[in-house]
Amino acid sequence: MKNNRLNHQVALTLMEGIGVKNAKVLLAYLGSVENIFDATINLRTEIPGFAKERFRELNRDIALEKAVSIVDFVHKNGIDTTFFTDQHYPRRLKECGDSPVLMYHRGNFDFNPRKSIAIVGTRNMTSYGKQLINELLATIAPYNVQVVSGLAYGVDGYAHTKCLELGIPTIGVLGHGLDRIYPVQHKKLAKKMVETEGCGVLTEFPQNTKPDRENFPQRNRIVAGMTDATIVVESGERGGSLITALLANDYNRDVYAFPGNVERPFSMGCNHLIASDKAHLITSGKDLVRLMEWEKESNEKSVQTNLFEGLEGDEKTIVTTIKEFEKISLDVLSVRLKKPVHLLSSLLLGLELKGIVMTLPGKKYALSRL
C-alpha cells in the first residue's frame, strides 16, 4: 500500500468521528497530515480538549486502506486535488470554519480570482429568470468575474451555459463524486466546462458517492464560501438556493436577490430574503456592478492605462517597475534599473506632476490610484 501524502489526505477525510473542524484541529496541533497517521502518536491522549470517547473506535490503518482505491481513481482519471494546507486552497473558503479539508476537481481554473460571485436559484426556472440571467451576465462580462454555481437543473445549469457562451469563467460544485455527473443531462455541459480555460467542476466527495439529498447542503456551503457575493435569481419558499443565501449571510458575504411578482411561486423566496433584510434588492446587472464597486475599479485602471500610453523610455520603465513591486524605495529602484539616484529623482518628480506616481512615507513610491 502506498503511503504518500495524498493517501494520508484522503484517509483523514475517511476517519470515523473526525469531521472537517476536528480534522483542522488535528492538523494545527500535529503540524502535518503525515503526523496524524504516525503510529507513535496517541490521538486519544495528546490532543488537548478532545474527548477520549471520540477516538474510541478510531482506526487510522482502516482509513488508509480505504484511501487506496480513491487515490488510484484520482491518478487514473487525471483528477486534481486541493488540500486545506495547500497554498492555492481558496482563500475565501479558508475563512469558513466548516470548509472542506480536501477537494477533487477537473479543469483549469483559478481558485483565487479577484472577483467571484455565486448565481443560484430554483430548478424550475421561468422565462423571467432567464431574462434576469441573460442581462446580469451580459453586464458583468467585461469585469472578469468568476461565476460559481451547482450545475443543477434550472438557474444553475442555465447560468453555466450562458457563462460559456459569453467567455465568463465558471465553476460547477457537485454534490457527488467525479465518477458521474448529476443530472445526467448536464454531462455534456460539465465536459465543456472542464475543457474550457478558466472553467471546471469540483467536489469534496470521492468517487462512488451518490447524489443523495443530504449532500447538497454541504455542496451549497462551498458555493457560498468560495465567492464574494451570492445572487439569488428565482426561488420558491424553500430550496437549496435559500440555504446557500443563508450560508453566505453566516459567512459575512453579500447576498443579492431579484424581486418578483408576489403571486409567482418562484419569486417568493427572493421576496422573503429582501423583506427580511437577508438580501439586497437588485433589479439589474448594473445594480450589482455599482454595489460591488467594480465600475470604480475599472475606471481607475482605464484612466491609469490611458496615462501610461503616453510614456516612453525611462519613464515607462520606471512605471513598469513600480507596478511590479507595488511600492518601492528610490534606492531599490536605482539598483533595479541600474540608474543613478539623481536621474531617477528628476524622472519621478515629473511622473508625480503628471499624477501617475505618488510618494509614500519612508521615501517609497507607488502608482497613484486615480
Image (tube, rainbow, N blue to C red):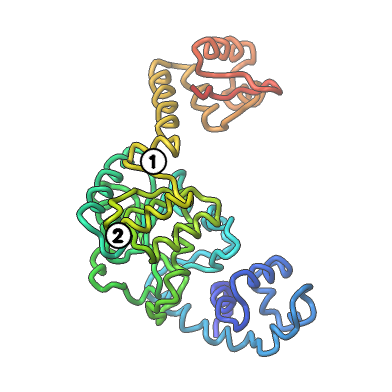
| Residue depth check, mark 2 versus mark 1: number of the one nearer the observer | 2
Vertical comparison of 169 with 60: above or below? above
Side (left or right) of 173 relative to 89: left
Q: Quadrant of residue 286?
A: top left
Which residue is outermost to the left? 127
What x and y, as percent, mark residue 362?
Answer: 71, 23
* Of callouts 2 and 1, the N-terminal one: 2
Side (left or right) of 155 relative to 249: left
Q: At 48% from the left edge and 67% from the top edge, which residue is drawn?
A: 103
Amino acid bearing label 1 = Leu
Closer to the camera in the image, 319 or 208 = 208
Q: Quadrant of the N terminus?
A: bottom right
Q: Under tag 2, what secondary structure?
A: helix
Closer to the camera in the image, 9 or 98 = 98
Q: Circle 1: is it few (<14), some (14-19), or many (20+) Cα within 10 Å?
A: many
Side (left or right) of 167 relative to 352: left
Vertical comparison of 337 with 97: above or below? above
Q: Which residue is mark 2?
A: 266
Q: Quadrant of residue 171?
A: bottom left
Closer to the camera in the image, 218 or 370 = 218
Q: At 57% from the left edge and 60% from the top edge, which residue is drawn?
A: 86
Vertical comparison of 352 with 36: above or below? above
Amino acid bearing label 2 = Phe
Query: Which labelled disc corresponds to residue 288?
Result: 1
Vertical comparison of 180 with 126: above or below? below
Q: Quadrant of residue 57?
A: bottom right
Side (left or right) of 193 relative to 328: left
C-alpha distance separating marks 2 and 1: 21 Å
Which residue is outermost to the front? 263
What x and y, as percent, mark residue 184?
Answer: 26, 73
Q: At 41% from the left edge and 69% from the top edge, which residue is drawn?
A: 79
Using the rendered image of the protein, determine whether residue 69 is visible from the camera's viewpoint: yes
